[in-house]
Amino acid sequence: MGGFTLAGGQGFFMRGWGATVDQWVTELEVVVPDGSLIRANASENADVFWAARGSGQGFFGVVTKFWPNGKLFNEVLTLAIEQNEKTPKYGTEVAVCTFFPEKFNPTIESDEISEPSSLMMSITAAAYVDSISEAETLLSAFDYVPDGLAEVVAGPAPVILKSWKEVFQEQDMLVPYGNGEIWHIDSILNDPSIPLPEMIEAIKPSQTQLPTRQSVGVIYIGDTYPDVGKMAFSLPQQYYISTFTCTKNPTKIPALRNWMKNVYREAEKVACEA
Ligand SMILES: Cc1cc2nc3c(=O)[nH]c(=O)nc-3n(C[C@H](O)[C@H](O)[C@H](O)COP(=O)(O)OP(=O)(O)OC[C@H]3O[C@@H](n4cnc5c(N)ncnc54)[C@H](O)[C@@H]3O)c2cc1C
């Protein structure tokens, strides 16, 4: 796998799908000659990322991890956005989160992402109504799972009743505090004129390459377009795209800040007023 990928990775149907390193590899973890472990992608250590993808035996580092292109992220986020468009706006909320399942394991203390671990995505649709049957009707668009995703989608989960107390407890589980957690957050509002596939590619690193076990990506679908003629509050609030990183180790702060800066440099390309 290592040699194949570093050499470019040619194979069946390449003329349509492209070479492995071009289409499939989005990020690498590399031990470089001075012994340090770095991450390399299109915006961070871009020279190493360029060299690794094609120099084969001539590559000067050792690749210890590959990140694939994460097509599923595109498909699940597109599903959430499309089904949101079929959902009545009044009294409903939709948010998409990315996280590692170990995030919610209270027996794990470490910030490290356990190996192997698969990033998970959740689509949460909520309705503020008087009965379960009203909620089921309002949120029925989210019962749909396309054939192509049926194998990887655990839901749809049934609509259930929740008190405000439970809702706030769940928010606290997503971003817990009070036990030495150190959080950083960055976010953008997207430019609605940018086509969805382009927007998704630009925000993908911020949502899928989470740097620690407790970190979480959150996309809140705002669907609100204030009128600049009416008030200063005028940035389009279509999608609020944010990442919360967490560590309990203060020495990790510079690396986490750097990670955030890099992924949001990419995401800002599709931000409104960018
Ligand atoms: C019969 C045959 C058919 C082939 N067909 C194809 C084909 O269809 N498509 C194609 O793309 N290629 C093909 N190749 C070439 C193949 O991609 C290369 O031989 C490739 O290097 C094999 O990958 P490997 O993972 O087994 O590497 P290895 O043979 O294990 O290593 C190759 C080189 O890469 C280095 N290396 C390996 N892993 C890492 C790592 N993680 N970090 C840094 N350096 C590393 C090794 O040190 C070594 O120098 C073919 C080769 C043969 C012999």
Image (tube, rainbow, N blue to C red):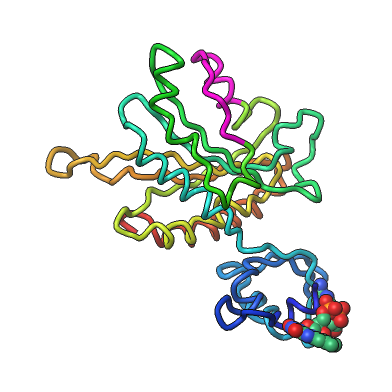
20 to the left or right of 204: right
Q: Quadrant of ligand 1?
A: bottom right
Q: Is residue 63 above or below residue 85?
A: below
Q: Which residues are magenta?
A: 155-172
Observer-nearest of 274 and 226: 226
Q: Residue at x 67, y 51 (%)?
A: 211
Residue 170 belongs to the span the image colors magenta: yes
Residue most extreme to the front? 147
Image quadrant assignment for residue 105:
top right
The spot of residue 262 in percent (x, y) is 55, 60
264 to the left or right of 71: left
The spot of residue 226 in percent (x, y) is 22, 40
The spot of residue 185 in percent (x, y) is 53, 43
32 to the left or right of 227: right
Q: Residue at x 56, y 57 (%)?
A: 205
Tell me the quarter of the image containing the N terminus: bottom right
Instruction: Tell me if I can see residue 34 in this picture.
Output: no
Residue 257 belongs to the span the image colors magenta: no
Q: Is residue 253 above or below residue 22?
A: above
Q: Residue at x 45, y 26 (%)?
A: 126
Q: Is residue 38 above or below residue 167?
A: below
